[in-house]
Image (cartoon, helix red, strand yellow):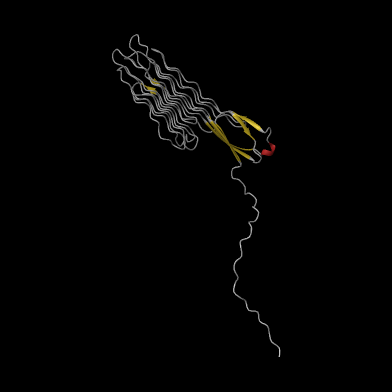
Amino acid sequence: MAYSAFEVEGPQGIIGPQGPDGPPGPAGPDDWADVQAFTVSGNWAKPASGSALHIFMMGGGAGGGGGCAHVIWTNHTGGAGGGAGGVTLGSRPFPMSSVTPATIAVVVGAGSAGGAAGAAFGGGGDSLAGGSSSFPTLTDAQGARPAMGGVGSTTLAGGVGGTGGTHSGCAGGAARTIAAAVKGGSATAALAFSGGGGGAGGSVNSANTAWAGGDGGNGGSTMQTAHAGGTAGAGAGPNGTDVATGVFGGGGGGAGGMSGGTVTGNNGYAGGNAGKYGAGGGGGGCGTNPAGGTFVGGAGGNGAGGIIVVVTV
């Protein structure tokens, strides 16, 4: 008699140890192949790969004008605030395989020094223009125009912001003796890519009343807090703040004006320096002099240098 064989599945055995890891897989593509930032002039180095460039350029900011130191009981102004540098944004097809040479020179515009303090019974010095930034094949981002030094008058226009291929920079604040100095220009929807303009220096009018310096303007899309100018008769303009993130610095504050008694005078205070990058310096406050006095005005604050950022994708 024949019998059929049956196989019965037994219980599962103990799980064995894990095997060795396999070899790593190929790297995925990078969203940004190469980023090079320049805060001073230098050479852009061609990366190994990429087919297009995205470039941000900002020109240098102008320093604030120096404050004057005219005779007491007359109208005389602090220096005007410096303007911010212009901005150019650009994108270009740029296959790395066809780029020669391996490096390309880029120029970053420097910020200009503030205007000199006015000598006794003299006007304040004008600042120089901020330097322009450039990268081949793109329109230059121009530096801001000079800010004028204080004079024996009632109104002094603020420095004009630089122009760029894409955006102009914010203007500096205007100095005046009939009211407080004007705040430096702040970035707005129309000027979202700009450092802040410098605040104007404080002035003194014919009634021997001293006026406060103007606030420095807010920088760019990061919208830094305004940087207050010096209080009339109290001190120097504060420096603009460097941004924690981004590239848009705050403008320097203008210095307060200094009045004097019937026979005394005072030196003017210095304007605040601009924050990085591209912002304008604050105007120097005016001083006052009695007959035979030797008091001087305050120097303008320095403008901030520009920046170039090149991204290859």
| Vertical order, 67 against 305 (above or below) | above
Q: Where does the N terminus fall, quadrant-wise?
A: bottom right
Measured as percent of width and height from the top left, residue 217 is found at 42, 31
The percent coordinates of residue 275 (x first, y second) are 46, 30
What residue do we see at 67% from left, 38% from top? 96
Q: Is residue 26 left or right of residue 118?
A: right
Q: Residue furthest bottom?
A: 1
Question: Residue at horizontal 62%, vertical 33%?
Answer: 44
Give the mark count.
0
Establish if 290 lies above or below 59.
above
**Front residue of 246 and 163:** 246
Tell me the quarter of the picture where residue 208 sits.
Answer: top left
For the view shown, which residue lies furthest in the right direction? 1
Residue extending farthest to the left is 262
Displayed quadrant of residue 56: top right
Q: Quadrant of residue 39?
A: top right
Query: Residue 233: where, in percent of width, then height?
Result: 33, 22
Q: Is residue 252 left or right of residue 86?
A: left
Side of 56 where 117 appears, left or right: left
**Measured from the top left, where is residue 201 in percent x and y?**
39, 23
Quadrant into which the C terminus falls: top right
- Tell me the residue at 63%/34% (across/down): 45
Front in this rendered view, residue 54 or 113 = 113
Who is closer to the viewer here, 166 or 99? Answer: 99
